[in-house]
Amino acid sequence: MKRLIAFATLIAPLYAHAWSFEHGAGVTSFETVEGRWYQQLQPHSLDTVSPEWSIGVTGSVLARAMWGVDWHADYVNLGRAASSCQCDTSDENYAAHNTQHTANFSGSGRVQGAALTLEPYVWRNGWRYGIEAGAFIYRSKWSETVTGWTVGDAPPQDLALSAAGWHATPVVGISVGGAVWSLSYRHYFMRLNSARQNVPPLWNDADVIEIKRRF
Protein backbone atom coordinates (compact mmCIF):
# COMPACT_ATOMS: atom_id res chain seq x y z
CA MET A 1 0.00 0.00 0.00
CA LYS A 2 2.82 2.39 0.85
CA ARG A 3 4.42 1.74 -2.54
CA LEU A 4 1.09 2.39 -4.27
CA ILE A 5 0.67 5.69 -2.42
CA ALA A 6 4.25 6.67 -3.25
CA PHE A 7 3.70 5.86 -6.94
CA ALA A 8 0.45 7.84 -7.03
CA THR A 9 2.21 10.80 -5.40
CA LEU A 10 4.95 10.59 -8.03
CA ILE A 11 2.68 10.55 -11.09
CA ALA A 12 0.08 13.02 -9.82
CA PRO A 13 1.97 16.11 -11.05
CA LEU A 14 2.51 14.45 -14.45
CA TYR A 15 -1.18 13.58 -14.77
CA ALA A 16 -2.19 17.10 -13.79
CA HIS A 17 -0.15 18.45 -16.72
CA ALA A 18 -0.90 15.66 -19.20
CA TRP A 19 -3.10 18.00 -21.23
CA SER A 20 -4.09 21.64 -21.41
CA PHE A 21 -6.61 23.87 -23.15
CA GLU A 22 -5.70 25.91 -26.21
CA HIS A 23 -7.47 28.72 -28.00
CA GLY A 24 -6.62 30.45 -31.26
CA ALA A 25 -7.79 33.29 -33.47
CA GLY A 26 -6.70 34.20 -36.95
CA VAL A 27 -7.58 34.65 -40.61
CA THR A 28 -8.73 32.16 -43.26
CA SER A 29 -8.00 32.66 -46.95
CA PHE A 30 -10.17 30.40 -49.13
CA GLU A 31 -8.80 29.28 -52.51
CA THR A 32 -11.26 29.49 -55.43
CA VAL A 33 -11.58 28.04 -58.93
CA GLU A 34 -12.48 30.33 -61.84
CA GLY A 35 -15.78 29.16 -63.31
CA ARG A 36 -17.22 27.88 -60.02
CA TRP A 37 -19.89 30.43 -59.03
CA TYR A 38 -17.99 33.27 -60.71
CA GLN A 39 -16.40 34.05 -64.07
CA GLN A 40 -13.28 36.17 -64.12
CA LEU A 41 -14.25 38.00 -67.32
CA GLN A 42 -17.79 38.80 -66.14
CA PRO A 43 -18.78 41.35 -63.45
CA HIS A 44 -18.25 39.62 -60.12
CA SER A 45 -17.16 40.02 -56.51
CA LEU A 46 -15.51 37.56 -54.13
CA ASP A 47 -15.35 37.49 -50.33
CA THR A 48 -12.74 34.84 -49.57
CA VAL A 49 -10.98 36.18 -46.43
CA SER A 50 -12.70 35.51 -43.12
CA PRO A 51 -12.01 35.65 -39.37
CA GLU A 52 -11.15 32.22 -37.94
CA TRP A 53 -11.06 30.80 -34.43
CA SER A 54 -10.42 27.52 -32.66
CA ILE A 55 -10.63 25.96 -29.22
CA GLY A 56 -9.51 22.57 -28.01
CA VAL A 57 -7.11 20.50 -25.95
CA THR A 58 -3.52 19.44 -26.41
CA GLY A 59 -1.12 17.11 -24.67
CA SER A 60 2.21 15.34 -24.92
CA VAL A 61 2.84 12.03 -26.65
CA LEU A 62 6.57 12.21 -26.07
CA ALA A 63 8.69 14.86 -24.30
CA ARG A 64 12.46 15.16 -24.16
CA ALA A 65 14.68 18.05 -23.13
CA MET A 66 14.95 19.60 -26.61
CA TRP A 67 12.27 17.88 -28.64
CA GLY A 68 8.98 16.00 -28.43
CA VAL A 69 5.62 15.18 -30.02
CA ASP A 70 2.30 16.78 -29.01
CA TRP A 71 -1.26 15.90 -29.99
CA HIS A 72 -4.05 18.40 -30.70
CA ALA A 73 -7.84 17.99 -30.78
CA ASP A 74 -9.42 21.30 -31.79
CA TYR A 75 -12.79 22.60 -32.90
CA VAL A 76 -12.02 24.93 -35.82
CA ASN A 77 -14.37 27.50 -37.35
CA LEU A 78 -12.85 28.54 -40.69
CA GLY A 79 -15.52 31.17 -41.24
CA ARG A 80 -17.51 32.32 -44.26
CA ALA A 81 -16.94 32.80 -47.98
CA ALA A 82 -19.29 34.44 -50.51
CA SER A 83 -19.49 35.36 -54.18
CA SER A 84 -21.73 37.15 -56.66
CA CYS A 85 -21.55 37.29 -60.43
CA GLN A 86 -23.50 38.35 -63.49
CA CYS A 87 -22.35 35.18 -65.23
CA ASP A 88 -22.85 33.65 -68.64
CA THR A 89 -25.28 30.75 -68.28
CA SER A 90 -23.39 28.67 -70.88
CA ASP A 91 -19.88 27.49 -70.08
CA GLU A 92 -19.28 26.85 -73.77
CA ASN A 93 -20.29 30.38 -74.78
CA TYR A 94 -18.18 31.85 -71.97
CA ALA A 95 -15.14 29.83 -73.05
CA ALA A 96 -15.66 31.02 -76.63
CA HIS A 97 -16.10 34.67 -75.46
CA ASN A 98 -19.56 34.63 -77.02
CA THR A 99 -21.89 35.77 -74.23
CA GLN A 100 -25.60 35.38 -75.09
CA HIS A 101 -27.45 35.00 -71.79
CA THR A 102 -26.38 36.02 -68.29
CA ALA A 103 -27.93 35.44 -64.88
CA ASN A 104 -27.24 36.79 -61.43
CA PHE A 105 -25.47 34.25 -59.20
CA SER A 106 -25.21 34.96 -55.46
CA GLY A 107 -24.01 32.50 -52.82
CA SER A 108 -22.34 32.02 -49.46
CA GLY A 109 -21.23 29.23 -47.17
CA ARG A 110 -19.31 28.22 -44.04
CA VAL A 111 -16.85 25.56 -42.87
CA GLN A 112 -16.35 24.21 -39.35
CA GLY A 113 -15.11 20.96 -37.86
CA ALA A 114 -12.56 19.08 -35.75
CA ALA A 115 -8.83 19.03 -36.46
CA LEU A 116 -6.99 16.01 -35.00
CA THR A 117 -3.24 16.32 -35.44
CA LEU A 118 0.20 15.26 -34.24
CA GLU A 119 2.98 17.83 -33.92
CA PRO A 120 6.67 16.90 -33.67
CA TYR A 121 8.67 19.87 -32.35
CA VAL A 122 12.15 21.01 -31.35
CA TRP A 123 13.44 23.76 -29.04
CA ARG A 124 16.16 26.07 -30.40
CA ASN A 125 17.45 29.17 -28.60
CA GLY A 126 14.30 29.45 -26.50
CA TRP A 127 11.91 29.03 -29.44
CA ARG A 128 9.69 26.06 -30.15
CA TYR A 129 9.42 24.98 -33.83
CA GLY A 130 6.70 22.49 -34.80
CA ILE A 131 5.48 20.59 -37.86
CA GLU A 132 1.87 19.43 -37.76
CA ALA A 133 -0.19 16.89 -39.73
CA GLY A 134 -3.48 15.08 -39.30
CA ALA A 135 -7.13 14.96 -40.30
CA PHE A 136 -9.83 17.62 -40.51
CA ILE A 137 -13.36 16.24 -40.05
CA TYR A 138 -15.64 19.07 -41.09
CA ARG A 139 -19.09 20.20 -42.13
CA SER A 140 -19.40 22.49 -45.13
CA LYS A 141 -22.53 24.30 -46.26
CA TRP A 142 -23.11 26.28 -49.44
CA SER A 143 -26.26 28.06 -50.65
CA GLU A 144 -26.62 29.63 -54.11
CA THR A 145 -29.41 31.73 -55.64
CA VAL A 146 -29.56 32.12 -59.42
CA THR A 147 -31.88 34.77 -60.86
CA GLY A 148 -32.81 34.81 -64.53
CA TRP A 149 -31.14 31.57 -65.57
CA THR A 150 -31.84 30.44 -69.13
CA VAL A 151 -30.20 28.55 -71.99
CA GLY A 152 -31.19 28.89 -75.64
CA ASP A 153 -34.81 29.93 -76.07
CA ALA A 154 -35.98 28.62 -72.70
CA PRO A 155 -37.81 31.17 -70.53
CA PRO A 156 -35.77 32.61 -67.62
CA GLN A 157 -36.23 30.98 -64.24
CA ASP A 158 -34.97 31.46 -60.72
CA LEU A 159 -33.11 28.69 -58.89
CA ALA A 160 -32.26 28.07 -55.24
CA LEU A 161 -29.48 25.53 -54.71
CA SER A 162 -27.84 24.31 -51.51
CA ALA A 163 -25.73 21.49 -50.15
CA ALA A 164 -24.42 20.56 -46.72
CA GLY A 165 -22.49 17.56 -45.50
CA TRP A 166 -19.67 16.05 -43.48
CA HIS A 167 -16.27 15.33 -44.98
CA ALA A 168 -12.73 14.37 -43.95
CA THR A 169 -9.51 15.71 -45.43
CA PRO A 170 -5.81 16.10 -44.56
CA VAL A 171 -4.43 19.17 -42.80
CA VAL A 172 -0.78 20.16 -42.40
CA GLY A 173 0.93 23.08 -40.70
CA ILE A 174 3.96 24.67 -39.09
CA SER A 175 4.31 26.75 -35.94
CA VAL A 176 6.82 28.84 -34.02
CA GLY A 177 6.51 30.23 -30.51
CA GLY A 178 7.08 29.54 -26.86
CA ALA A 179 5.55 27.47 -24.09
CA VAL A 180 2.33 29.55 -24.02
CA TRP A 181 1.99 31.62 -27.20
CA SER A 182 2.60 30.51 -30.79
CA LEU A 183 2.04 31.61 -34.37
CA SER A 184 0.89 28.86 -36.74
CA TYR A 185 0.07 28.28 -40.39
CA ARG A 186 -2.24 25.48 -41.54
CA HIS A 187 -3.32 24.28 -44.99
CA TYR A 188 -6.65 22.42 -45.28
CA PHE A 189 -6.94 20.18 -48.38
CA MET A 190 -10.68 20.55 -48.92
CA ARG A 191 -10.44 20.37 -52.71
CA LEU A 192 -10.51 16.58 -52.36
CA ASN A 193 -14.21 16.86 -51.46
CA SER A 194 -15.38 20.18 -52.92
CA ALA A 195 -15.32 19.23 -56.61
CA ARG A 196 -17.30 16.00 -56.02
CA GLN A 197 -20.41 17.62 -54.56
CA ASN A 198 -23.55 18.16 -56.65
CA VAL A 199 -23.65 21.76 -55.47
CA PRO A 200 -19.96 22.44 -54.81
CA PRO A 201 -18.87 25.28 -52.54
CA LEU A 202 -16.93 28.26 -53.83
CA TRP A 203 -13.70 27.13 -52.17
CA ASN A 204 -11.16 24.45 -52.78
CA ASP A 205 -8.40 24.53 -50.16
CA ALA A 206 -7.99 26.99 -47.30
CA ASP A 207 -4.96 28.64 -45.69
CA VAL A 208 -5.07 29.80 -42.07
CA ILE A 209 -2.69 31.98 -40.07
CA GLU A 210 -3.49 31.84 -36.36
CA ILE A 211 -2.19 33.09 -33.02
CA LYS A 212 -2.67 30.37 -30.41
CA ARG A 213 -2.43 30.33 -26.61
CA ARG A 214 -2.17 27.40 -24.20
CA PHE A 215 -3.66 27.75 -20.72
Image (tube, grey):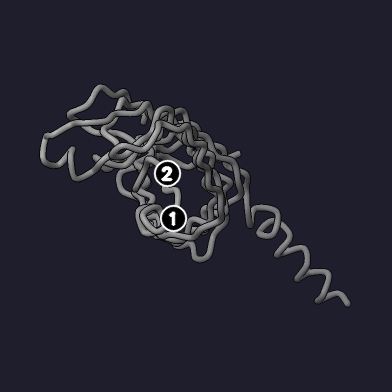
What amino acid type is highlighted by mark number 1? Gln
The residue most toward the front is 153
For this view, does 123 lie left or right of residue 164? Answer: left
On the image, the x and y values in percent for residue 193 come to 41, 57
Residue 208 sits above or below residue 199 on the image: above
Nearest the viewer among 76 and 68 is 76
Q: Residue 131: name its quadrant.
A: bottom left
Task: Residue at 43%, 38% (x, y): give it.
Answer: 182
Q: Residue 5: name its quadrant.
A: bottom right
Q: Secondary structure at mark 1?
A: loop
Q: Secondary structure at mark 2?
A: loop
Nearest the viewer among 129 and 172 is 172
The residue most toward the right is 1
Nearest the viewer among 213 and 99 is 99
* Residue of label 2: 201
Residue 138 sits above or below residue 24 on the image: below
On the image, the x and y values in percent for residue 97 come to 11, 35
Nearest the viewer among 203 and 189 is 203
Residue 131 seen: no
* Residue of label 1: 197
Task: Residue at 18%, 31% (x, y): give it.
Answer: 99
Query: For the residues marked 1 and 2, what is the alpha-carbon distance in whole angstroms?
Result: 8 Å
Residue 100 sits above or below residue 141 on the image: above
The answer to the question of whether label 1 and label 2 lie on touching residues, with beta carbons closer than 8 A, is yes
Q: Quadrant of the C terminus?
A: top right
Task: Residue at 31%, 37% (x, y): give it.
Answer: 153
For this view, does 22 lie left or right of residue 212? Answer: right
On the image, the x and y values in percent for residue 30 come to 35, 38
What amino acid type is highlighted by mark number 2? Pro
